[in-house]
Image (cartoon, rainbow, N blue to C red):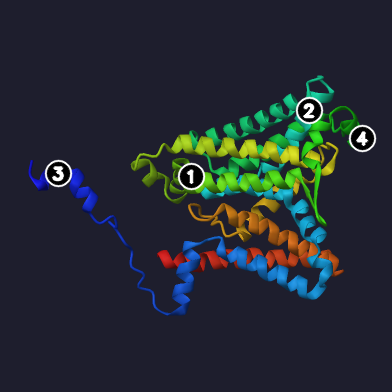
Amino acid sequence: MSSSDNYESAATTANAQVAQFEDNRKGLVGQIQNRLHQTPSLVPLIVLVFSIALFGLLLGSRFFSPFALTLILQQVQIVGVLAAAQTLIILTAGIDLSVGAIAVLCTVVMGKATFSYGIPPAISVAIGLAVGTTIGAISGWLVSRMKLPPFIVTLGMWQIVLAANYLYSANETIRSQDIEAEAAFLQFLGYKLQFGGATFTLGVVLMIVLFIVLAYALRSTAWGRHVYAVGDDPEAAELSGVNVHKTYMSVYMVTGFICGLAAWVMIGRFGSISPSATTGVIGNIQAITAVVIGGISLFGGRGSIAGALFGALIVGVFELGLRMAGADPQWTFMLIGWLIIAAVAVDQWIRKVSA
């Protein structure tokens, strides 16, 4: 065999750098634009650090205390988990208006299974997770097989789930003291851990672990690459061998499962189970806000799951900082509104680097 036919030997001596994109951009602005394009979570991280520094200068040790900083994590734990779910949908160029309603329905299912049917709390939690996953599968099937727009599907699902929630629960609230006495496991994620002056709940721990797992899955697995590919161009993804239907189904089912986790976090956070919890109405908006501020593109295919966590924390920092400063709560909405517009404007500016 000639040396030219010895492919394995040739491969060992070949240059591993088979392709390289040369950055021809000139000037500081071009380099910054390119860097932000390569690292989508950099912008929300800068905004988060700037906002913490700003309120730290204005409020001093009151804001920089371990209790205050960990209180932000406790406040955003529900929105953070819902934002993780919303991120998956938006990465596929969709949007889910039903995540908050699914979470509330799952809390009701967990409570009814335990108190009305006598099912052990651990199994009730599993049933709630299964219900969330099933609702996600229905939405995914309608989007993938029926080719219905995600906005319309989840808008309808939002109304259906909210109505089912009130009908199934008969609008009855399960009190915190009853859950604590008879089904403490439902409040498990509300258990508090002390580190110095900081206070964490298991719900916060779950939120951080969830983001770590999703970051790994999106960055280092074939499934994660398929999610980005489908969000960027589903037709091109299908031509390259990606099972688009399977990817859509998996994304919506995982999203429903995460909504079930958010339900468990809600019970731990609030103690009680109420079908009229505000999360069912505004949870969707809060999750979308965190995702948009976190730099995930509403056009799909671009963004980092870490950005969603930073986005949720930015909202938490503004809410707590302005409250401690004694500002009118309306300032929070105004500033967050400007942040949303600024985040979309920055996303459009960064996208020009790939145009």
Kind of residue at badge 2 = Tyr
Q: Where is residue 134 in the image (x, y as percent from the top left)?
A: 62, 30
Kind of residue at badge 3 = Asn
Mark 1 or mark 3, earlier in chain: 3
* Circle 2 or circle 4, nearest the eye: 4
Mark 4 or mark 1, earlier in chain: 4
Kind of residue at badge 4 = Gln
Mark 3 or mark 2, earlier in chain: 3
Task: Tell me the CA gap for discs 1 and 2.
Answer: 36 Å
User: Relative to 210, is 342 above or below?
Assistant: below
Q: Is residue 182 left or right of residue 75?
A: right
- The residue that disc 3 covers is 6
How crowded pointer 2 is (Cα within 10 Å; few <14, some 14-19, many 20+) is rated as some
Secondary-structure class at tag 4: helix
Mark 1 or mark 2, earlier in chain: 2
Kind of residue at badge 1 = Gly
User: Relative to 13, is 104 above or below?
Assistant: above
Secondary-structure class at tag 1: helix
- The residue that disc 4 covers is 177
- The residue that disc 2 covers is 168
Q: Where is residue 156 in the image (x, y as percent from the top left)?
A: 64, 39
